[in-house]
Image: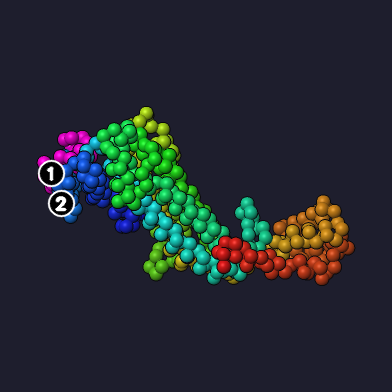
């Protein structure tokens, strides 16, 4: 985790102190369940809860681990220092390290997902607000980077909203799938720990019992979780790239907010660079880079190995912290994005009337001209606009083959901009439901 791209609430989930607190709660709830079943004395289970207000000493645990070379044993040894060795002798009864590690990891991922879901809800609110603000702000649509036909800035925001709304569903699904726990003992057979212990621990910690585990929780769940994060990151970049295009000097249809005192270049004082959205493109690459290792973690040897462990120690914090930061940054960009409607119209009129070519093509075919001839007539006049910057409508009115099929009034009507925005309300109703 790099502090520059981290936010405190998400970072706190991955702090060692948080991890050890979760480990403690897993062990304490397991002791409660075993006491209820008569497996261990109630007094010993109650004694474990004496440490509920303890701030576990991370440095001390690290010191013990330096000798034991085992993180869970180091923690259990430190716990016994607080509870008492005799009172703590039933802690971890019948359990294996993965019961603690995997259940904890899934709790951390579920908590991280809760933050990401809240982030996404904030981003959706910003996109919806800007969509309605610019519902009728006309801009040119582009295909292959080339002027196509008119659209609106509101529709641009709306399509990003719809994409992010799908991502919200993906995040919720990923959270549900990852929120399982396993207290099933060595190789997952419950030979030394009653399945009811697992049920109790999971209920106390807001998880569902893993239906069947080996010595670890199946990693296809984690692969799906990180894949969902990768898709969200790609959507973040999708929005960022559009904004980066709009901020280009020769386009300038929108731009990131440029704060007082901000500098764009160490060499060129005039620069206003899209640094936030460029940064988002880079952050998206990092989140996506963590998807493949998560996929490769699915194939573990037999009932367990630890080839996944080192991977998850990195991608768990890094992917969630980075995506949390990216979503917050994108929300801020959308909230403060400066939109230039006049430039949108100016860009669209750079080749006067050219974007209405399809309407003229369709009108000619409806007037009885073959599609091939209609295309030839429209294209030859359109190419003049490309090459010399003349007015497309004027060229059509001066073309006898065109006017033989269409009257001047019919040609004029084909240049009504409102034609292209007549279904905006319908699309908005589909996207926003209101």
Mark 1 and mark 2 in contact? Answer it, CB < 8 Å. yes
Instruction: From the image, tell me which residue sits under label 1.
Output: 87
Predominant secondary structure in magenta? helix
Query: Is 411 above or below relative to 222?
Result: below
Q: What crowding class fits label 2: few (fewer than 14 Cα within 10 Å), some (14-19), or many (20 or more)?
A: few
Image coordinates for residue 273, horizontal then vertical, percent: 46, 60
Residue at 46% x, 66% y: name it: 335
Q: Distance between the residues labelled 1 and 2?
A: 10 Å
Residue 409 is labelled as none
Image coordinates for residue 227, horizontal then vertical, percent: 45, 45
**Residue 235 or 40: which is nearer the viewer?**
40
Stretch in magenta: 65-90
Mark 2 lies on a secondary structure that is helix
- 45 within the magenta span: no
Q: Relative to 406, is 79 on the left or the right?
A: left
- 69 within the magenta span: yes
Residue at 79% x, 64% y: name it: 395
- Mark earlier in primary sequence (1, 2): 2
Do we see residue 271 in this rendering?
Answer: no
Image coordinates for residue 394, horizontal then vertical, percent: 78, 67
**Residue 19 or 107: which is nearer the viewer?**
107
* Snapshot quadrant of residue 386: bottom right
Do we see residue 359 in this rendering?
Answer: yes
Image coordinates for residue 88, horizontal then vertical, percent: 15, 42
Instruction: From the image, tell me which residue sits under label 2.
Output: 50
Quadrant including the C terminus: bottom right
Q: What crowding class fits label 1: few (fewer than 14 Cα within 10 Å), some (14-19), or many (20 or more)?
A: some
Residue at 63% x, 59% y: name it: 141
**Residue 69 or 289: which is nearer the viewer?**
69
């Amino acid at each position: 985790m790099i502090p520059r791209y981290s936010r405190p609430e998400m970072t706190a989930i991955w702090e060692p102190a948080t991890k050890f607190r979760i480990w403690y709660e897993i062990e304490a709830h397991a002791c409660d369940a075993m006491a209820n079943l008569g497996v261990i004395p109630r007094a010993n289970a109650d004694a474990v809860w004496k440490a509920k207000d303890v701030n576990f000493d991370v440095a001390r645990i690290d010191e013990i681990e330096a000798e034991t070379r085992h993180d869970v044993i180091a923690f259990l040894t430190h716990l016994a220092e607080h509870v008492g060795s005799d009172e703590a002798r039933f802690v971890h009864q019948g359990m294996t390290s993965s019961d603690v590690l995997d259940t904890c990891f899934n709790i951390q991922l579920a908590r991280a997902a809760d933050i990401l879901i809240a982030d996404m809800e904030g981003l959706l609110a910003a996109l919806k607000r800007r969509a309605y603000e610019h519902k009728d702000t006309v801009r040119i649509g582009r295909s292959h980077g080339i002027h196509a036909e008119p659209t609106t800035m509101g529709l641009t925001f709306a399509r990003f909203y719809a994409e992010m709304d799908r991502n919200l569903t993906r995040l919720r699904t990923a959270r549900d799938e990852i929120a399982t726990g396993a207290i099933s003992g060595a190789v997952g057979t419950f030979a030394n720990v009653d399945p009811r212990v697992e049920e109790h621990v999971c209920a106390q910690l807001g998880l569902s019992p893993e239906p069947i585990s080996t010595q670890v929780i199946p990693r296809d769940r984690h692969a799906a979780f990180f894949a969902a994060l990768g898709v969200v990151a790609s959507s973040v970049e999708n929005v960022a790239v559009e904004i980066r295009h709009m901020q280009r000097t020769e386009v300038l249809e929108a731009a990131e907010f440029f704060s007082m005192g901000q500098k764009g270049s160490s060499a060129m004082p005039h620069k206003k660079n899209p640094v936030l959205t460029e940064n988002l493109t880079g952050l998206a690459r990092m989140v996506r880079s963590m998807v493949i290792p998560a996929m490769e973690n699915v194939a573990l040897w037999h009932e367990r190995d630890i080839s996944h462990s080192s991977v998850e120690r990195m991608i768990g914090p890094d992917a969630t912290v980075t995506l949390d930061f990216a979503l917050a940054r994108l929300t801020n960009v959308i909230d403060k994005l400066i939109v230039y409607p006049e430039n949108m119209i100016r860009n669209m009129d750079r080749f006067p009337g050219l974007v209405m070519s399809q309407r003229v093509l369709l009108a000619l075919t409806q007037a009885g001209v073959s599609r091939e001839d209609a295309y030839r007539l429209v294209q030859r006049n359109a190419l003049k606009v490309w090459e010399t910057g003349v007015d497309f409508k004027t060229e059509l009115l001066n073309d006898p083959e065109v006017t033989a099929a269409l009257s001047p009034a019919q040609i004029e009507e084909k240049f009504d901009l409102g034609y292209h925005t007549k279904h905006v309300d319908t699309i908005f109703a589909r996207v926003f439901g209101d």
